[in-house]
Amino acid sequence: MNKIIKNTLILTAITVVSGLLLGVVYNVTKEPIAQAQENTKQEAYRAVLADASSFETLDFDAESTLSLLTENGYTSDTITEVAEGNDNSGETIGYVISVQSSEAYDGTLDLSVGIATDGTVKGVEMLSISETAGLGMKADEAEFKDQYKDKNVENFTVTKTGEDGDNMIDAISGATITSNAVTNAVNSALVYYQNELGGEVNE
C-alpha cells in the first residue's frame, strides 16, 4: 500500500511540475509568436496594397459576413480581418481583406487580398499555406498569384484549358483543388468588398 501511495505521489508531482513548465514555456513564447504573426500580416498587407502608408483594422459582423459568402456560394471561406489602407494624407486608397479557406487540399490556407477603391485587385499574398510541395505550394509563387494582380473583374474563374480573359486564372498543373481554393478565397474578398465596402467594378 505504501508503495502505491508513493508512486501515486511521484506521478502527481511529475504531472504538476510538467504542467507548470508548460505554462511557463507558453507565457515565454506567446508574445514572440504573436509578434511574428503580426509581422507576417503587416508584410502581407504592404505587399498587396503597396501604395498604402498605414492600415486600420475595421470592425465587421462575422455572422452576417458568413451569410453573405454562403449566399454567393462560398461556403468554404471565412473573412478573418478587414483593414482600410490609407496614403500619407490619410485618404483611403483601398482595403485588405483576409480570408481563410477550408477548401484547400491539405487542410486550410489563409490569404490577404488587396483591393483598390475602384475594385482593382492589387495583389494576393499567402498568410499560411501547407499544400503539397511542387504542386499546391506553387500557389504561393508569383507566377500564380500575379494572375489576379491589377485585374478589375466581378469574380475570377479557374481554367485548365488556357482560356483568355482578365477573369480567367490558369490552374496549377496537378493542383486544381488548390487553384480553386485560392480563387474562391479571392472571390470571397471581392464579394465582401462589393457588398459591404461600397465597391464597384469597372465595366
Image (cartoon, rainbow, N blue to C red):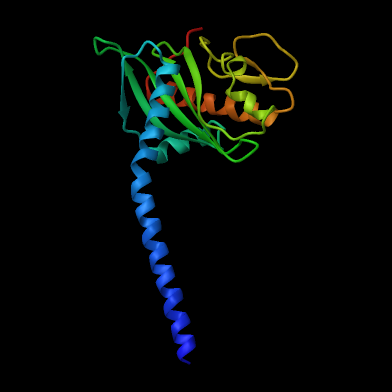
Residue 130 place in picture, x, y as percent: 59, 35
Q: Nearer the viewer, residue 54 or 156?
A: 54
Residue 103 in which image quadrant:
top right
Q: In the rendered image, which quarter is residue 76 located in? A: top right
Asked whether 24 or 131 is in front, the reply is 24
> Residue 40, image x and y in percent?
42, 28
Residue 92, position as x, y percentages in the image: 31, 14
39, above or below 63, in the image: above
Towards the viewer: 153 or 115: 115
* Number of marks present in the image shown: 0
Based on the displayed image, in which of its 4 quarters is residue 24 positioned? Answer: bottom left
Residue 13 percent across, percent down from the top left: 40, 72
Residue located farthest toward the left when viewing the structure as drawn: 89
Residue 110 placement, left or right of 156: left
Is 29 above or below relative to 14? above
Q: Residue at x 42, y 79 (%)?
A: 9
Residue furthest to the bottom: 1
Residue at the image position 66 percent from the left and 29 percent from the top: 136
